[in-house]
């Protein structure tokens, strides 16, 4: 169980490397080749099939990742990929057998996190937001007495409070109900 649906980079690294107690995580890239016409559609189908196969192979956590972006590969929009995989696994009757974790540079604002959770994500690692915090600290744009860990914890707390505020306005008290 998680205290918050936002994972810091250390938690994400642990999750990727976990293999104890027959608990396994599978990382699936959600990048597509920008040089091939129509590849985003094909890549989305590949991602859905890889997620389905991973559940069949016994993986309990599916990680959809946007890492590896370069001049030739761009990410499928994270919300689109999350929703597509979530709905695909529901149609196949496999969604309850796995958690869906998003590792993306896209989410920054509370609304981004709320929509990802609403469309099927169980947890999110906004790695670019954390790298931005680190960069801001190195350029003295954040209070000097605040450590990197404290700054990240403050960001996670703020995002968590924002998500819970959205949920409470809807009369929802758990992340599972919101999803």
Image (cartoon, rainbow, N blue to C red):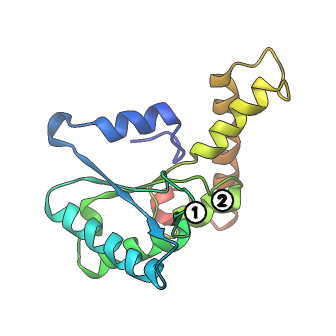
Q: Nearer the viewer, residue 96 or 39?
A: 39
Task: Specify whether 123 is left or right of 171.
Answer: left
Please identify the quadrant where the N terminus is shown: top left
Residue extending furthest top?
A: 145
Cα separation, mark 2 vs mark 1, equals: 5 Å
Q: Which mark is residue 52?
A: none
Residue 127 drawn at (x, y percent): 57, 43
Q: Which mark is residue 172?
A: 1
Quarter occupied by residue 30: bottom left
Residue 104 drawn at (x, y percent): 54, 54
| 41 lies above or below 58 | below
One can see residue 68 in this view:
yes
| 148 lies above or below 23 | above
Residue 149 drawn at (x, y percent): 62, 24
* Classed neighbour count for the residue bearing mark 1: other residues with Cα under 10 Å, few (<14), some (14–19), many (≥20): some
Q: Which mark is residue 168?
A: 2
Residue 160 drawn at (x, y percent): 63, 46
Task: Specify whether 131 is left or right of 11.
Answer: right
Q: Residue at x 51, y 56 (%)?
A: 174
Task: Specify whether 168 is left or right of 38.
Answer: right
Q: Secondary structure at mark 1?
A: loop
Residue extending furthest bottom?
A: 38
One can see residue 156 in this view:
no
């Amino acid at each position: 169980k998680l205290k918050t649906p936002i994972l810091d980079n250390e938690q994400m690294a642990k999750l990727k490397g976990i293999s104890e107690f027959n608990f396994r995580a599978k990382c699936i890239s959600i990048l597509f080749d920008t040089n091939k016409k129509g590849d985003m559609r094909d890549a989305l189908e590949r991602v859905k099939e890889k997620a389905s196969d991973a559940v069949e192979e016994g993986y309990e956590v599916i990680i959809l990742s946007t890492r590896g972006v370069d001049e030739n590969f761009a990410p499928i929009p994270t919300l689109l990929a999350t929703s597509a995989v979530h709905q695909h696994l529901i149609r196949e009757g496999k969604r309850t057998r796995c958690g869906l974790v998003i590792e993306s540079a896209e989410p920054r604002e509370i609304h981004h996190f709320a929509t990802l959770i609403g469309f099927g994500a169980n947890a999110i690692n906004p790695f670019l937001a954390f790298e931005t915090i680190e960069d801001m600290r190195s350029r003295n744009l954040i209070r000097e007495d605040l450590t990197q860990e404290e700054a990240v914890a403050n960001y996670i707390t703020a995002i968590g409070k924002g998500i819970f505020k959205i949920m409470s306005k809807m009369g929802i008290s758990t992340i599972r109900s919101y999803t």
